[in-house]
Image (cartoon, helix red, strand yellow):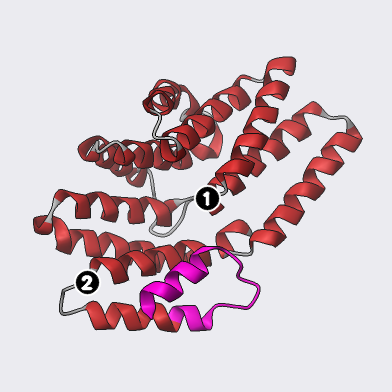
Amino acid sequence: AVSQTGLIQAAYKSIAAALLIAEQLNHPHSLAHALSVATLVGFVVRDYQALGLHAHRMMEVAEKYNFPPNRAHELIVSGFSRSLVEGDAEGLATIESEFPRASMIGPMFRVYGGMLAEARLRFGKISEALEVLDWALGTVTEPGLGLYVPELHRLRGLCLLRRGSSEHGEAMHSLQTAFETARQQGATLFQLRAAMDLAEASHGTEEEEKFHQSLADFCNALPKEFDAPERAAAASISS
């Protein structure tokens, strides 16, 4: 939850404390859970180096103690990192293979859907990305509720933008839904990403000034503790 607010160092401190306690207790289940959360934090804040290190260690724990859910989680997050950072098609293939099984386990299915969609988008598979995003969003029973829901709306908007100008209106609606949902959830980092995409997507339209000013206002209102890299990137867009 802390990572979604953009307080990256605070999130890392919590992860370090959780890992230390799990190791001191010598409790494999607690360690596996802490590592799973650590990979999720790396994913949310786009720290793929940290994600990879924690995922590798989690696989060691999963193999040693025979934890199938943690093994599936590791394969998906590692596949995501390889596909996004290295452009490795085998990484996408790994996510495709593990997704049906992993999406049946626990509350992370929407996050896995987001990973699969973003990896598909990375390789230009826009229709396939939209398919899994629409599936994931279709599981939301009450507007604004659910882990990673703001990012699912944002990714949907990006997919629609890639389709062409005929989808621009619906794409902007998805991005605005992402912004409002993130605001409702207090997910400041996700809210900033949506504001950045809205500003960039509005370039050359009548709404360009409005969305650039909105992004500038949002950046000015960020707390000083907000230390996500997006802060600097957003400032450059809105300037």
- Name the image quarter holding the C terminus: bottom left
Q: Are marks 2 and 1 in contact (CB under 8 Å)?
A: no
**Residue shown at the point (65%, 42%) measured from the top left:** 37
Q: Name which quarter of the figure residue 225 lies in.
A: bottom right
Q: Amino acid at mark 2?
A: His
Name the residue beneath numbered marker 2.
203
Q: Residue 220, relative to residue 55: is it above or below? A: below
Q: Who's the residue at 60% across and 36% down the image?
A: 52
Q: Is residue 118 magenta?
A: no
**Span highlighted in magenta in the image:** 218-239
- Distance, label 2 to label 1, CA atoms, is 25 Å
Q: Position of residue 188 (x, y in %)?
A: 52, 67
Q: Is residue 51 visible?
A: yes
Q: Quadrant of residue 237?
A: bottom left
Q: Which residue is mark 1?
A: 46
* Residue ID at (54%, 63%): 229
Q: Quadrant of the N terminus?
A: bottom right
